[in-house]
Image (spheres, helix red, strand yellow):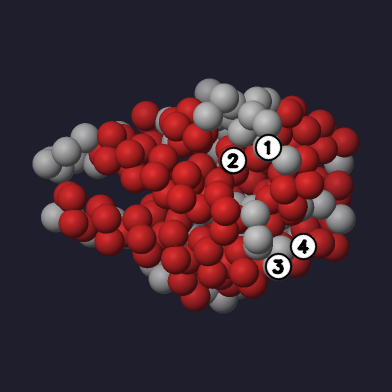
């Protein structure tokens, strides 16, 4: 059973956890896995449980997302290999999130919130470094740039550290309603991770993976 989200008491405490040997080992274990193809990256990145909240839609949400996700990553690989900066990567993630939301609206005749759409994209991107035969330099650059798939665990973990906006104890991915809120949290995480000397995605390893 998953633990309740841990609320970090201070920036220094979070830095200490990010630098810990346990976090480093867990991250290395996560990214050492090899996944044979992009379709499997998408499937493993977003499990079936993620779609349980969707109800009364004209098509199966997991099928719609996985079809879109496979086309998205396949078409984005060349662009991703040219991205070197955090600003470029931010633009890529925001554009991808918008693209998913538009596709979802077209197929499902229903809006997909910004928070869940960005989380779905980032879950897939988190798994992408595990793609078999990926160039090692590209893999390491991607790990360095990855955003956190913001959810209950990663958001609530920051509620004592970020006071504006105020994060409720029951916050979920739906707490993130617009790009400005998303970027505020991602940039805070990236800033703390830089101070800790680790990639920002280590925060997700710490807040989510190590709690499950």
Label 3, secondary structure: give it: loop
Position of 161 relative to 100 (above/below): below
Q: Within 10 angstroms of label 3, few (less than 14), some, or many (20 or more) residues?
A: few
Q: Earlier in the sequence, mark 4 or mark 3?
A: 3
Q: Nearer the viewer, residue 196 or 105?
A: 105
> Under tag 2, what secondary structure?
helix
Q: Which mark is residue 192?
A: 4
Disc 2: which residue: 128
Q: Earlier in the sequence, mark 1 or mark 2?
A: 2
Tell whether label 3 touches label 1 (CB within 8 Å). no
User: Which residue is found at the position 18% from the left and 50% from the top?
Assistant: 107
Nearest to the eye among marks 1 and 2: give it: 1
Mark 1 is surrounded, within 10 Å at the Cα level, by few (under 14), some (14 to 19) or many (20 or more) other residues, namely: few
Compute the Cα span from label 4 to label 1. 28 Å
Quadrant in the rendering for residue 129 = top right
Residue for badge 1: 134
* Residue 196 shows up from this direction: yes
Question: In the depicted view, which residue is nearer to us: 72 or 107?
Answer: 72
The residue at 45%/32% (across/down) is 39
Q: Which mark is in front, 4 or 3?
A: 3
Q: Quadrant of residue 130?
A: top right
Q: Nearer the viewer, residue 146 or 16?
A: 146
Q: Are marks 1 and 2 in contact (CB under 8 Å)?
A: yes
Of the two numbered discs 1 and 3 in the rendering, the one whose residue sits closer to the viewer: 1
Q: Residue 139, position in %: x, y?
A: 72, 44
Which quarter of the rendering shows the C terminus? top right
Q: What residue is shown with label 3?
A: 85
Q: Residues within 10 Å of mark 4 (few under 14, many from 20)?
A: some
């Amino acid at each position: 059973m998953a633990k309740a989200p841990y609320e970090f008491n201070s920036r220094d405490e979070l830095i200490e956890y990010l630098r810990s040997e346990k976090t480093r080992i867990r991250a290395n274990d996560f990214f050492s896995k090899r996944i044979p193809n992009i379709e499997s990256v998408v499937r493993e990145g977003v499990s079936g449980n993620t779609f349980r909240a969707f109800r009364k839609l004209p098509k199966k949400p997991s099928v719609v997302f996985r079809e879109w996700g496979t086309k998205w990553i396949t078409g984005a690989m060349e662009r991703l290999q040219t991205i070197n900066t955090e600003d470029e990567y931010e633009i890529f993630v925001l554009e991808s999130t918008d693209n998913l939301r538009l596709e979802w609206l077209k197929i499902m005749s229903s809006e997909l919130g910004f928070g869940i759409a960005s989380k779905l994209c980032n879950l897939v991107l988190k798994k992408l470094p595990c793609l078999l035969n990926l160039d090692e330099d590209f893999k390491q650059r991607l790990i360095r740039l990855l955003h956190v798939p913001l959810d209950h665990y990663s958001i609530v973990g920051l509620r004592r550290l970020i006071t504006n906006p105020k994060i409720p104890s029951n916050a979920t991915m739906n707490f993130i309603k617009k790009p400005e809120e998303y970027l505020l949290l991602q940039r805070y995480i990236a800033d703390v991770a830089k101070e800790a000397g680790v990639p920002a995605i280590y925060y997700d390893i710490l807040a989510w993976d190590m709690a499950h």
